[in-house]
Amino acid sequence: MDKMKVGIIGTGNISGIYLKNGSRFGSMEIVACADLDVERAKVRAAEYGIRGCSVEELLAMDDIGMVINLTIPQAHAAVCIQVLEAGKHVYVEKPLSVTGEEAKRIMDTAERKGLRVGCAPDTFLGGGIQSCIKLIDEGKIGTPIGATAFMMSGGHESWHPDPAFYYRRGGGPMFDMGPYYLTALVSMLGPVSRVTGSARISYPERTITSQPKAGEKVAVEVPTHVAGILDFAAGPIGTILTSFDTKGGSTLPWIEVYGSEGTLLVPDPNNFGGEIRLRRAGEREWTDLPLTHGSAENARGIGAADMAKAIVEGRPHRASGALAHHVLEAMEGFHIASENGSHYAMKSSCERPEPLPAGLDDFVLA
């Protein structure tokens, strides 16, 4: 299969793992990277033996068919649309954008141009979640009835070098970490038809205690404790709780899926692998289960690689813009429902991504 030539826009810290893993997939070849700071792009490019350039120069390269957008969330929509208008497919880091309105503009532009949109997170394509999907599809827990998901932390100001973003528009625990959990849930249980939620700002101001900005105050603009309920179109009911306010820690699990014949403990959706445990109805003990799928280590970029392969083969890609748009709407829906004191009926939907075949080697797609 011919490799698709790919460029990267945005050469911050996360670009390193994309550049490292990009050469490990057989479907794409990263040939250039760009940044508003061209010198930073050139430094990053030199590490990997590719071309560093301006955004305009990258978008003018005829051999590049797809661009990976690694800019900050507030710039996601503008850069995605710029890439699409240049005639190239785009894959973007999560979230797709910071508002549903922006996300719709991205998707409408792609449809008008006959191009594809893909979006992280792609951790659901790792061995952990894919093995859970296989167990659910095989009926190991019977008919899915419900699920719970928990992301509990005390916030970023104690360890992150520049945590202010997490408390401003586009931040908060739901927009920061919700995509991992909700994408995993949709990949296992299918799309969501309705949500409701409650959200609050527990501390109007945060004091940074990490270096180099220790002592600086951050005004909190977004809810930092968000509880949501999801009605899945297929019938299950899910609960999700994301928080930056649990100062004393938590012992809650990452994700559990409940079925008519058993319960499945799902690994951390922020990682690619992890431990899976199953307890079937009538059993007294949990059973540890092996992973049936590869790419259980840090396979970040697998979503972009699958998209490149899918474009060449003419099939749907798994980490799709439609999936990311649906997840974004659900996250917005929790906040809207909290403000309005009502349920929020989802306007978007998506196909449940096609599971990967079991038994593939790491960094191999099918």
Image: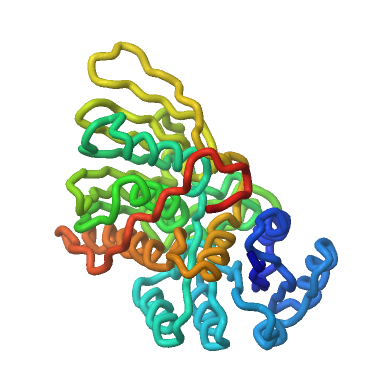
Picture coordinates of residue 2, whole percent (x, y): 66, 68
Can the viewer see residue 153 in this picture?
A: no
Q: Residue at x 46, y 63 (%)?
A: 317
Which sits in the foreground, 21 or 316? 316
Q: Is residue 62 left or right of residue 41?
A: left
Residue most extreme to the left: 342
| Residue at 20% across, 30% down | 260
- x, y (%) of residue 352? 34, 55
303 vs 12, nearest the viewer: 303
Q: Is residue 72 above or below residue 115?
A: above
> In this view of the protein, can residue 278 be seen by the observer?
yes
Residue displayed at 51% across by 65% down: 310
Q: By what rule are the colours in the image chosen?
A: rainbow
Residue lying farthest to the top in this orientation: 284
**Residue sitting at x 49%, y 38%:** 128
Q: Quadrant of residue 20?
A: bottom right
Locate residue 301 relative to residue 182 in the image: left or right.
Answer: right
